[in-house]
Amino acid sequence: MDSANFYSNLNAFADFADVTDQDKFWTLPDDWSVVVADITNSTDAVGKGAMKAVNIIGVSVITSIRNAVAPLDIPYIFGGDGATLCIPNKFITETRRALLVTHELARQQFQLELRVGIVGIEQIRAAGKDILIGKHTLSEHYDQAAFAGGGIEFAEDGIKNGGLSCLDSGADVSTQDANYEGLECRWNKVPSKHGETIAVIIKANGENDAESTKIYQEVLKKLDSLYGQDEKCRPVHSSGLRMTYNKELLSHEARVRTAGLTQENIRRYYGQIRWKNLLGWFLMFFRIKAAGIQWGDYKKDLVTNTDFKKFDGTLRQVISGNSQQRQDLETFLSSLHKQGKCNFGIHVSDAALVTCMIDNRAGEHYHFVDGADGGYTIAAEAMKQQMAE
């Protein structure tokens, strides 16, 4: 297998529950590395109402690195307040620049501190961990990466806690030195169909991989029994998708895409977004086919191309349900926690936030979801508190 095309050549599995089956995973090649990006002050930022800024910086990391290695397909996962990716080592120079530029972008445009680092797989294996990659089919247009082996957690913890070195944040870079083409943030909050949208993070505490696998299988079975199949609990649904014309909401995308440009260019970009939103509404509402795109299907594709379930050694989901379902889930997870089987965090909201990455609008557009008003960031903080008890 050609190393650079390692991920694109993987067979995908259709059932999300197969994230617990390591026979569906492959070992990361020897000449690849892990990229970690994490916002240090995300909890404070969320508390000040900067949730969309936190999310868009996480997606900016993914977008800039994907553009830097294009057209190569690479595995990545959005974490709410950051992102983790794997890249072939031959793209480290391009990736390093994209990371440093995004670090400066976060600081200059949003007053956020973004830690960034690159960790070689050999360093991870020297610590007794590994990275296994799986590929889960979300839709006909979108295969999502899954991770196992403990290596992702090792790299993330090392970058966050100082055990591994971050990239030099003092590098002389310009905000124009990275490509954020495709990054969009043009939708209002998506209200829950059932009253609540929860972000839940669950980390199994098995004494070995086999025991942790059993715990995750038990948790996934319970989630299915409580919330039902995907169509019942998706946090993003067509009827709730409304584009925004609010300048403050649109400013998150604009601040990324126009960083370093003149005020005239920035004003022009705002005008273009509003005009494109109005045109998009017209095309979708009247189900018009134009430029090879069936606009009547765009919202449907958006819904199925959204990453509301993911696994990177830790189970993360954003799901829609009612208060009774959530209380039953909390009771179940609390019981597992008391038995020492898992730690978890849940954040409750009434809506979801969506940040988009567009390759093309004919189907290859991908959407990253988080709970509104805190989401994964607050859920992760709750889980950390459990672990510290």
Image: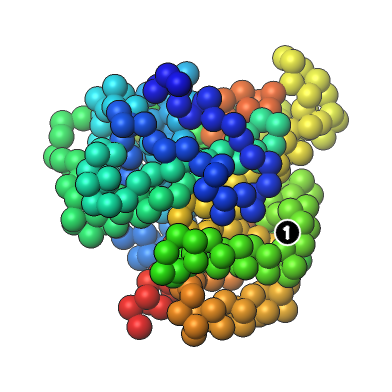
Chosen colour scheme: rainbow
Say if 316 sits above or below 345 in the image: above
For mark 1, does the 10 Å Cα neighbourhood hold few (<14), some (14 to 19), or many (20 or more) residues? many
Which of the pair 206/302 is nearer the observer? Answer: 206
Across and down, in percent, residue 30 comes to 31, 31
Q: Residue at x 81, y 31 (%)?
A: 296
Q: Assign a secondary structure to mark 1.
A: helix
Query: From this viewpoint, is residue 112 visible?
Result: no
Res. 158 image quadrant? bottom left
Q: Residue at x 47, y 38 (%)?
A: 26
Please, which residue is most extreme toward the right here? Answer: 286
User: On the rendered structure, is 175 left or right of 167?
Assistant: right
Query: From this viewpoint, is residue 35 visible?
Result: yes
Res. 298 image quadrant? top right
Identify which amino acid the numbered label 1 is placed on: Cys
Q: Residue at x 57, y 77 (%)?
A: 333
Across and down, in percent, residue 134 comes to 52, 41
Please, which residue is most extreme toward the top here? Answer: 291
User: On the rendered structure, is 56 left or right of 235?
Assistant: left
User: On the rendered structure, is 325 left or right of 367?
Assistant: right
Say if 362 sits above or below 202 in the image: above
Q: Quadrant of the N terminus?
A: top left
Q: Total of numbered circles in the picture? A: 1
Across and down, in percent, residue 161 comes to 23, 60
Q: Residue at x 45, y 26 (%)?
A: 6
Across and down, in percent, residue 177 comes to 29, 25
Residue that mark 1 sits on: 233
Which of the pair 176/361 is nearer the observer? Answer: 361
